[in-house]
Image: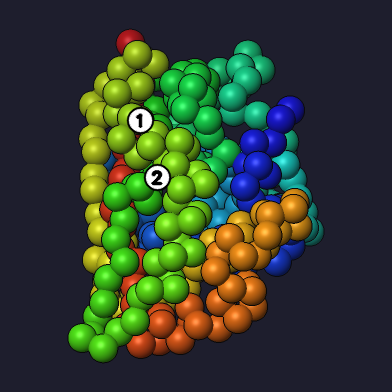
Amino acid sequence: MTDTYTDHMTRRPSEVQRLNDQFDLMTENIGYILHPSVTLPPAPRIADIGTGTARFLLRLQPTYPDARLEGFDISSSLYPPQSTLPPNVSLAELDMKQPFPEDMHGKYDLVHARMLVAAMRPSDWETAVRNLARLLKPGGFLQWEECDFLNAEWKKSAPNSSIEKTRHIGDAFRAALHERLMHGWNTLPDHMPAAGLTSIVSDVVSSDRVPETREKVTEGILNLVFTWARLMVERGASETMFGDTLDRLENVVHDEIRSGCYFKYNIHVACARKALV
């Protein structure tokens, strides 16, 4: 299995808290963890693809204590210890870009995925949607959330807010991942019908729908950007490409965030259903 996520990101233990916070803040701004169109039986079987830290399953578990909750990822390095998981949560390694075993086909009431863009090449999306759709029972739901970072904006919440250094390193990150960021958020609804899915719904929500989250959302995005930047330096890039040493630049960026600089982007939710017959 080829882990393309590590082309630009890491799976170090230090990433766990950032990813959990990112999930929680995004969910708060979306306003739901399951799209209102999703209807599930009392004891559903649910798969989370690209589960990472299993945050989705652990957030969902109290609502569905009788569910069978299964998380899959190409790497188990960010999984919580098995001893800490509720008894109805299980985690395993699988590559969503490859066909799933046939004994998994048609077994799930809901298949969920979120924020997989860093692991996806442009040609991967259609294949992944098709593979995930095969897991669904007739009448089962696929829900997938991705963000449009390509058209994101750096904003000032006050006239004297500073954004220059933050925008500089943020734009460097966006340029490095430009090809990947062009897809997913805008192409998922188009791939779903070809995979046999119907009743397709697309929601678009601003990352600052809840204004009080702006600072934390921006800090989370910049922590992601600096994780990427340090990985690039480890792999031989010069810190001068970012205009300063990363430690000094990070201090300036956090000062700019405190001054009222924030990052605004759209969150796209694509939800569809497998036909009943």
Please name the residue that numbered disc 2 is placed on.
146
Q: Which mark is residue 188?
A: 1
Q: Residue at x 48, y 78 (%)?
A: 253
Residue 263 in the image, given as x and y percentages of width and height: 35, 66
Q: Which mark is residue 72?
A: none
Quarter containing the N terminus: top right
Q: Locate residue 239 relative to residue 167 in the image: left or right.
A: right
Q: Locate residue 27 relative to residue 123 in the image: left or right.
A: left
Q: What's under tag 2, amino acid-wise? A: Glu
Is there any visible trace of residue 8 in the rendered image?
Answer: yes
Check disc 2: other Cα within 10 Å, few if <14, some if 14-19, many if 20+.
many
Badge 1 element: helix
Q: Residue at x 53, y 34 (%)?
A: 120
Q: Locate residue 50 relative to residue 204 in the image: left or right.
A: right
- Name the foreground residue: 170 vs 277: 170
Splitting the image into 4 quarters, where does residue 86 fall?
bottom right
- Name the foreground residue: 75 vs 229: 229
Q: Locate residue 207 relative to residue 243 in the image: left or right.
A: left
Residue 121 in the image, given as x and y percentages of width and height: 52, 30
Do tag 2 and tag 1 residues touch (Cβ < 8 Å)?
A: yes
Residue 15 in the image, given as x and y percentages of width and height: 65, 62
Quarter containing the C terminus: top left
Is there any visible trace of residue 218 in the rendered image?
Answer: no
Residue 232 in the image, given as x and y percentages of width and height: 67, 54
- Residue lying furthest top: 277
Labels 2 and 1: the sequence-earlier one: 2
Q: What's under tag 1, amino acid-wise? A: Leu
Up-down relation of residue 110 to residue 145 (above or below)? above
Check disc 1: other Cα within 10 Å, few if <14, some if 14-19, many if 20+.
many
- Name the foreground residue: 197 vs 185: 185
Q: Residue at x 63, y 13 (%)?
A: 102
